Each structure stands twice: as structure tokens, then as C-alpha cells.
Image (tube, rainbow, N blue to C red):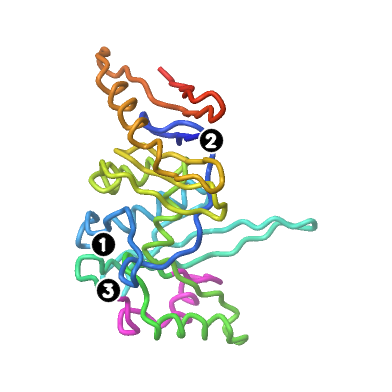
Amino acid sequence: MSILSGEDHPKNAGVFPGRLSPSVSSQQGYLTVLDFTELSADGQDLELLIRELLFRQGFSVHWSGKGADGGRDLVCVEKRGSFFQQDKRSWLIQCKHNAISGKSVGIGDLDDISDSCAQHNCQGYLLVCSTYPSSAVVNRLEGVSNNPQNQLTATYWDSVKVEQLLSTPKNWALAQRFFPISAAAEDWQIYATEMPNHWVVTYKGYYFHLRNRIGSYRGYHLESIKKRISDIESLDFPGKHFLRPRSVYYDDKNGGYEWYVDY
């Protein structure tokens, strides 16, 4: 078994991004690690989170002004490569923060998508929810995309999709910034990936990729690793000095652990 840690934060290191399996929101029966009720009730934190996330992906993003609900819309410019000539597509992004009420985003929460995109000269529309869209909203977005007269692409990110995008070594520090409580939870949170012996793990703000032999029990070594992390954290260092685990390898033939720690 190996545990590979993330980067971009004193508690994260490494460059081993995992791909999470598709899932649905906690309101539909699946648990999420990040608690979206930590975001400000006025929705500004969600807007800032998405803006920062897109910046990290290398997109050009700017505010378009306030929408009909008082929130600020985002415009993201996506540059697309081509063998002949590079072009670009602009996306209008609207964020709907219903996590505190737990309600889905309904049709009444949306502007006229086609008119809003035309107003901002956008060819794509993205709805970002801190909960999830209703079935009527999903049908509306599909209808916009399937209408050849619109020449628009419309899609959505629910809370699970946002969490998946944040659950990478590159973006986990962003999750820690906007979700300081749930991202630093002391419980082990383990997610399946597309490989049967590979999981994504968070623990006390650390971000791991966990791998072990196919068919073995993934939690077998967690208590031992937890104790070693506690030992590392208990070491006394001068201010702004720290150790962070980069990776832990378990030698299943000889029964020992090999730790790589950054200072």
C-alpha cells in the first residue's frame, strides 16, 4: 500500500492527482466531505470560490455585473486550440447558493438563459449549485443545448461536482481556504476512484491518494499512519517551520513502512 500526499499547502505535497468516480449530491443519498453551509449566506463565497477555481485552471475570468437575483455573474473565456487557428468561447456562469436551506435550484431561480448569454456575448452557460438542480432545470439546460437555433451549450455543476474539482492536489488548498472546518475534519474520508485499489483520502486537512493490493482491506493501516502523523505534528519547531508527509509506502513483503517527509 502507498499513500501519496497532495501539494500547494503546508499540509499537502506531491503531484499525484486522482480522478474521482462520478457521483451525485448528498441530498440524493451520497455523502460529501465539504460542508457548503460554511460558505457565506449571501452567495459571495461561492462566487469567489468558483472564480478562484477557474483562475487556477488557467482561464480568464471577470465579473459581468449583478444578475436578477442580486448575485454577480461571471464570464469565463475558454481558449481552444486548433491545428489551423486558435479560437475562444465565452461562458456565462451563474452561482446559486441554496446549501443553507438544502433546497434544489428551481426554474424560478434562473434568468432567461438565451437572453442572458446574448447580453454578455457568451456561447456557453454554466449553472453552479451548492446543492443540486431540480429535474426541471436539468431539462431546461438540455433543451437549450439541443436547440440548434440557440447555438449555446448549457450545463451545470452541483455540489458533488464542485467537490470533485477541489479534491485534487492542485486545488485542495482552495478547499481548505473556503471550507476551513470540514476540510480539516479529523475523521478519515475515503472515496473510491475508477481503480479498485486506489482511493482518495482526506484526514485533518491532509490530502492523500491511497493505494494497496487488490482485494486487501483499505483501512487496515490507517490507525498506524494516524499515529505517525500525530508524532510528526507533536515535534517542536521554530515558528513557520514544519514537517509534512510527502508519501508513505508499505513494504508488504517485509512488513515495514517507508516515510518521505519534507521540511
Q: Is residue 98 above or below residue 16?
A: below
What separation in Å lies between label 3 and label 1 (alpha carbons)? 11 Å
Judge whether 210 appears above or below 257 on screen. Answer: below
Instruction: Residue under label 3, please give it.
Output: 69
Q: Is residue 247 above or below residue 140?
A: above
Residue bearing mark 2:
15
Instruction: Categorize mark 3 by other alpha carbons within 10 Å: few (<14), some (14-19), many (20+).
Output: few
73 with respect to 78 (left or right): left
The 10 Å Cα crowd at callout 1, few under 14, some 14 to 19, many 20 or more, is some
As measured in the structure, the alpha-carbon distance from the residue carrying label 3 to the one carrying label 2 is 40 Å
Quadrant containing the C terminus is top left
> At which x and y percent is residue 7?
45, 34
Q: Which residue is at 51% across, 34% downward?
A: 2
Does residue 16 belong to the magenta stretch?
no
Q: Secondary structure at mark 3?
A: loop
Q: Which residues are magenta?
A: 104-126
Q: Secondary structure at mark 1?
A: loop
Residue 107 magenta-highlighted:
yes
**Rendered location of residue 238, percent (x, y):** 26, 12
In the image, 63 versus 218, the foreground residue is 218
Q: Amino acid at mark 1?
A: Gly
Q: Which residue is mark 1?
A: 43
Q: Residue furthest right?
A: 84
Q: Residue at x 32, y 66 (%)?
A: 26
**Residue 168 in the image: above or below residue 44:** above
Kind of residue indicated by mark 2 = Val
Q: Nearer the viewer, mark 3 or mark 1?
A: 1
Query: Which of the marked residues, 3 or 2, is nearer the chain's N terminus?
Result: 2
Instruction: For mark 2, give the secondary structure.
Output: loop
Closer to the N terminus: mark 3 or mark 1? 1
